[in-house]
């Protein structure tokens, strides 16, 4: 097992810019989810992909979008960045629906 | 509205004692419940999963109970150690979407 790897670890962007965050999940983990975690809060669900199809979305605007690729990698794109988008973005994968999730260490995004 | 409540105040205990953390929820019918540990600046780490038809689950020094009538889960760490100090998150998994929804977590501090 190689775990879940996220890149970059830290990122600073300017309001209005666009950002792409990347995740490489474990081989065999068909489900990948992205979460946003503000300081002192629990992770908030953004969306989930299963075998490259989005199969769940949280209460986030359309400027948050994603993709999952056949090689178990995925990405989160955020357009028109706002100051409130500053947070820790977490990628998590699971082999099936009744297993726990394996999380990456996250990408710390700061919007200035 | 759906709500997951974890005590926002930190739990301070002495080494060797049993730590008990609480997760209450309303307006959910979870298929199962998960507990995670999160250290500062890191992603959550999966600890235990308990299904709606299970009352109790154990793993080494960890024990989780799940009462669907009270809508509550208790997470116990016996013989606690300073290395157990972290934030502990509960996550409810909806039976329809199988997407975990997280509470905000409770900080545990074990004093030597």
Image: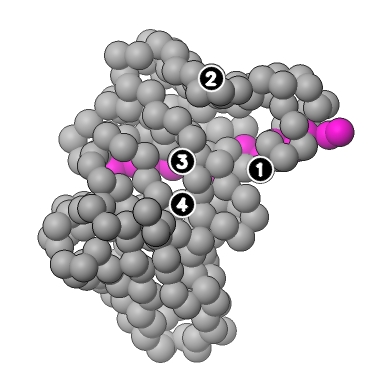
In-image side of B89 versus B39 (left or right) = left
Q: Nearer the viewer, mark 4 or mark 3?
A: 3
Q: Is residue B63 above or below residue A28?
A: above
Q: Position of residue A3 (x, y in %)?
A: 41, 57
Measure the C-alpha gap from mark 4 to mark 2: 23 Å
Q: Nearer the viewer, mark 4 or mark 2?
A: 2
In-image side of B13 versus B8 (left or right) = right
Q: Earlier in the sequence, mark 3 or mark 2?
A: 3
**Where's the N terminus of chain A, which quadrant?**
bottom left
Q: Is residue B27 magenta?
A: no
Q: Nearer the viewer, mark 4 or mark 1?
A: 1
Q: Is residue B103 magenta?
A: yes
In-image side of A47 versus A12 (left or right) = left
Q: Give the image quarter of residue B1.
A: top left
Residue indicated by mark 1:
B86
Q: Dot 1, how many residues are within 10 Å of its Cα: few (below 14), some (14-19), or many (20+)?
A: some
Q: Is residue A36 visible?
A: no
Q: Is residue B29 above or below residue B10?
A: above
């Amino acid at each position: 097992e190689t775990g879940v790897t996220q890149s970059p670890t830290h990122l600073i962007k300017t309001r209005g810019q666009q950002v792409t965050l990347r995740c490489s999940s474990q081989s065999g983990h068909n489900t990948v989810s992205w979460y946003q975690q503000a300081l002192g809060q629990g992770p908030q669900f953004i969306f989930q992909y299963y075998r490259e199809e989005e199969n769940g979305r949280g209460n986030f605007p359309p400027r948050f979008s994603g993709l999952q690729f056949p090689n178990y990698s995925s990405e989160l794109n955020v357009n028109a960045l706002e100051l409130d988008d500053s947070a820790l973005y977490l990628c998590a994968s699971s082999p099936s629906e009744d297993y726990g999730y394996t999380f990456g260490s996250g990408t710390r995004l700061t919007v200035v | 509205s759906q709500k997951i409540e974890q005590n926002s105040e930190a739990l301070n205990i002495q080494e060797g004692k049993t730590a008990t953390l609480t997760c209450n929820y309303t307006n959910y019918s979870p298929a199962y419940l998960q507990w995670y540990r999160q250290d500062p600046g890191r992603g959550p780490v999966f600890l235990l999963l308990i299904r709606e038809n299970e009352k109790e689950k154990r793993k080494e020094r960890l024990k989780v109970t799940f009462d669907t009538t009270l809508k509550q889960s208790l997470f116990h760490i016996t013989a606690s150690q300073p290395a157990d100090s972290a934030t502990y998150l509960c996550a409810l998994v909806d039976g329809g979407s199988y997407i975990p929804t997280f509470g905000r977590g409770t900080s545990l501090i074990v004093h030597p």
